Image (cartoon, rainbow, N blue to C red):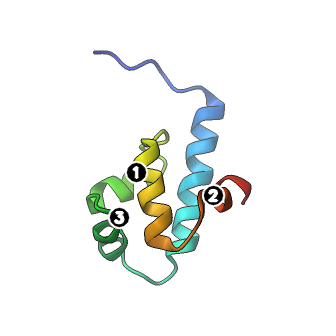
Amino acid sequence: MVRTPLTPEERRRGERLGALLREARGGRSMVEIAASAGISAETLRKIETGRAPDPAFFTVAALAGALGLSMDELLTR
């Protein structure tokens, strides 16, 4: 299956999410947060760097929980 190219807005949204997650992670390791969220460190790295700009809802929810953020905080920051 071929993925359709992301729009510039989708890329920007992914970059904003990645930056917010990096900021919230602070000094904690990527491995620690990924394990707490039940995802691979590679997946978290891709999200944080914008290479996976459209992660699944449950992945984002798990990351928010691991970082002590609400979904509302992710949307309003």
Q: What residue type is labelled 1?
A: Thr
Separation (CA) of disc 1 from disc 3: 8 Å
The C terminus, quarter of image: bottom right
Query: How much space separates mark 3 and mark 2, taking CA atoms?
Result: 15 Å
Q: Which of marks 2 and 1 is nearer the N terminus?
A: 1
Q: Mark 2 highlights which residue?
A: 74
| Picture quarter with the N terminus | top left
Q: Residue 59 carries which label?
A: 1
Dot 2 and dot 1 residues touching (CB under 8 Å): no
10 Å neighbourhood of mark 3: few (<14), some, or many (≥20)?
Answer: many
What kind of residue is marked 3? Ala
Which residue is labeled 3 in the image? 37
Q: Is mark 1 on a helix, strand or loop?
A: helix
Do the CB atoms of the residues marked 1 and 3 lie less than 8 Å apart?
A: yes
Residue 70 left/right relative to 43: right
Q: Is mark 3 on a helix, strand or loop?
A: helix
Residue 74: image location, x then y, percent: 63, 58
How far is mark 2 from mark 1, CA to CA? Answer: 13 Å
**Is tag 3's residue or tag 2's residue first in the polypeptide sequence?**
3
Q: Position of residue 5 (x, y in %)?
A: 48, 22
Q: Which of 34 and 71 is in front in this view?
A: 71
Q: Which residue is drawn at 44% across and 62% down?
A: 63
The correct choice, above or below, for 60 with respect to 10 in the image is below
Are the residues at dot 3 and dot 2 in contact (C-beta closer than 8 Å)? Answer: no
- Residue 24 numbered mark, or none: none
